[in-house]
Amino acid sequence: MPPTPTPPPPAGNFQSGRQVFVTVGCSTCHRADGTGLVGPRIANTNLSFAEVLGQLRSPREGMPPFGPETVSDQQVRDIYAFLKSLP
């Protein structure tokens, strides 16, 4: 029997994601348009939602962690929707 495919994450709201992106400070390192500054370009990321969530929770390369007490999983979905909406 073939493995059951993993369902996609629930949809996020890109407008809320834009607000959270700025409010929690993501734009400080990644710019408000996600084109990167100190942090890398993440606009229209090729990373999966699971990879973005993992990077936020257990970051590498000097990024501070953003636990669920700072950014909920739904807010991460919203941020992901925002990032995917960018050119």
Image (cartoon, grey):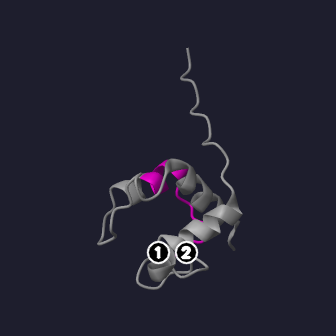
Relative height, residue 28 to residue 10 (above, below): below
Question: x, y (%) of residue 80?
Answer: 59, 59
- Residue 25, disc: 1
Q: Quadrant of residue 38?
A: bottom left
Q: Which residues are magenta?
A: 40-53
Q: Residue at x 56, y 66 (%)?
A: 20
Horizontal placement of 78 versus 27: left or right?
Answer: right
Q: Amino acid at mark 2?
A: Val
In the picture, which quadrant includes the N terminus? Answer: top right
Q: Residue at x 46, y 53 (%)?
A: 53
Horizontal placement of 60 versus 56: left or right?
Answer: left
Question: x, y (%) of residue 9?
Answer: 60, 42
Mostly what secondary structure, the magenta segment?
loop
Q: Quadrant of residue 67?
A: bottom left
As helix, strand or loop, the secondary structure at mark 1 comes to: loop
Q: Mark 2, residues whose alpha carbon is within 10 Å: few (<14), some, or many (≥20)? A: some
Q: Spatial distance from mark 1 to mark 2, Cα to Cα?
A: 5 Å
Q: Assess whether mark 2 and mark 1 are in contact (beta carbons under 8 angstroms).
A: yes
Q: Residue at x 62, y 40 (%)?
A: 8
Question: x, y (%) of residue 25?
Answer: 46, 75
Can residue 56 be seen here? yes
Q: Mark 1, residues whose alpha carbon is within 10 Å: few (<14), some, or many (≥20)? A: few
Near-viewer residue (23 or 51): 23
Picture mark count: 2
Q: Residue at x 67, y 47 (%)?
A: 11
Can residue 84 be seen here? no
Question: x, y (%) of residue 74?
Answer: 56, 49
Q: Amino acid at mark 1?
A: Gly
Q: Quadrant of residue 39?
A: bottom left
Say which residue label 2 marks.
Answer: 22
Horizontal placement of 42 versus 82: left or right?
Answer: left
Asked if residue 82 is among those painted magenta in the image, a careful observer would answer no
